[in-house]
Image (cartoon, rainbow, N blue to C red):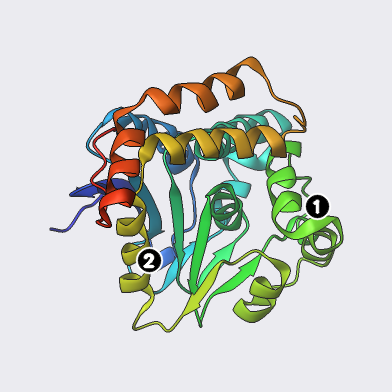
């Protein structure tokens, strides 16, 4: 069913999909879209039936081709307006990076600027062979924030992050894969099937394990290099869970486990 919202969520079974829906503008992100993203993420997070979130464009024309340039002459024409815009992008990017459930960016065609920022904040990036990536602050005189830049550095390393940010070049999917920005590449005909196939696989795994490991990996990425009280707690309580009992039983009985925790 057609949806007139520029960004919205649809749910099918245990998978939610967040759509960017401005195909005539290559899904360029407006201030209002940025502001809405955290609200949608909260809705998905609170829905216990949903285990995985996919982010994508509404069609194959683009994932998201950066900011809506028209707002550079309106909202972002002053330092005060730029701060309002930057605050919205920061809140949305942080909400996605800290989202408890697994996230997959399904990238078709353009993934530029803020679109690449959101893709980098996801846990995985599946791209088709037409995908193009770039972050172009050096072409606009813009400085990106520390958190979003750190996500990029964590993915591709300092040297490749500098290449992307200093040059402002648009890179093809093969170079993005070589840099570590992309997990898997598929044909345009297969990208949707392969992305949701992987999402469905994650739905079959122990969710307490997935969310705990995501938390621990994020802690490591933030510089934590020793156990905290929370990481110790997560390690211990898993052995008391029904999922642990089911996992062991399934292994012993040589069958697929059926995990219940959500």
Residue that appears at 46% across and 36% down: 211
Q: In the rendered view, does 83 fall on the left or right side of 203?
A: right
Q: Secondary structure at mark 2?
A: helix
Q: Nearer the viewer, residue 121 or 13?
A: 13
Residue ranking furthest to the left: 1
Q: Quadrant of the C terminus?
A: top left
Name above or below for residue 43 compared with residue 185: above
Residue that appears at 53% across and 39% down: 214
Residue that appears at 52% across and 61% down: 125
Query: In this figure, what is the number of numbered marks?
Result: 2
**Considering only order in the chain, which callout, 2 or 1, is on the residue closer to the N terminus?**
1
The image's mark for residue 77 is none
Q: Nearer the viewer, residue 7 or 93?
A: 93
Q: Secondary structure at mark 1?
A: loop
Q: In the rendered view, does 238 fall on the left or right side of 125?
A: left
Relative image position of residue 181 (x, y in whole percent): 64, 64
What is the spatial separation of the Cα atoms under label 1 and label 2, in whole angstroms? 35 Å
Where, by quadrant of the figure, is residue 54 drawn? bottom left
Relative image position of residue 204 (x, y in whole percent): 29, 51
Circle 2 residue: 195
Q: Residues within 10 Å of mark 2 (few under 14, many from 20)?
A: many
Q: Nearer the viewer, residue 108 or 192?
A: 192
Residue ranking furthest to the top: 229
Circle 1 residue: 141
Residue 124 visible at all: yes
Where, by quadrant of the figure, is residue 137 drawn? bottom right
Q: Residues within 10 Å of mark 1 (few under 14, many from 20)?
A: few
Relative image position of residue 1 (x, y in whole percent): 12, 58
Residue 16 visible at all: no
Tag in front: 1 or 2: 2
């Amino acid at each position: 069913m057609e949806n007139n919202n520029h960004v919205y969520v649809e749910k099918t079974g245990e998978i939610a999909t967040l759509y960017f829906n401005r195909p005539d503008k290559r899904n360029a992100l407006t201030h209002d879209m940025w502001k809405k993203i955290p609200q949608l993420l909260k809705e998905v997070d609170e829905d216990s039936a949903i285990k995985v979130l996919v982010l994508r464009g509404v069609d194959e024309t683009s994932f998201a081709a950066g900011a809506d340039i028209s707002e550079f002459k309106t909202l972002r024409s002053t330092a005060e307006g730029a701060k309002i815009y930057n605050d919205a992008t920061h809140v949305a990017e942080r909400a996605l990076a800290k989202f408890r459930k697994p996230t997959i960016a399904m990238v078709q065609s353009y993934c530029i600027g803020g679109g690449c920022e959101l893709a980098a904040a996801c846990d995985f990036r599946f791209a088709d062979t037409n995908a193009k990536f770039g972050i172009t602050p050096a072409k606009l005189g813009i400085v990106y924030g520390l958190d979003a830049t750190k996500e990029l550095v964590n993915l591709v390393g300092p040297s490749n992050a500098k290449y992307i940010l200093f040059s402002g070049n648009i890179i093809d999917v093969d170079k993005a894969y070589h840099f570590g920005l992309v997990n898997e590449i598929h044909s345009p005909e297969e990208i949707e099937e392969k992305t949701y196939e992987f999402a469905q696989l994650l739905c079959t795994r122990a969710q307490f394990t997935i969310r705990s490991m995501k938390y621990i990996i994020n802690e490591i990425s933030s510089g934590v290099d020793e156990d905290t009280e929370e990481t110790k707690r997560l390690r211990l309580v898993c052995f008391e869970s029904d999922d642990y009992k089911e996992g062991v039983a399934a292994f012993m009985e040589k069958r697929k486990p059926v995990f219940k925790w959500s």
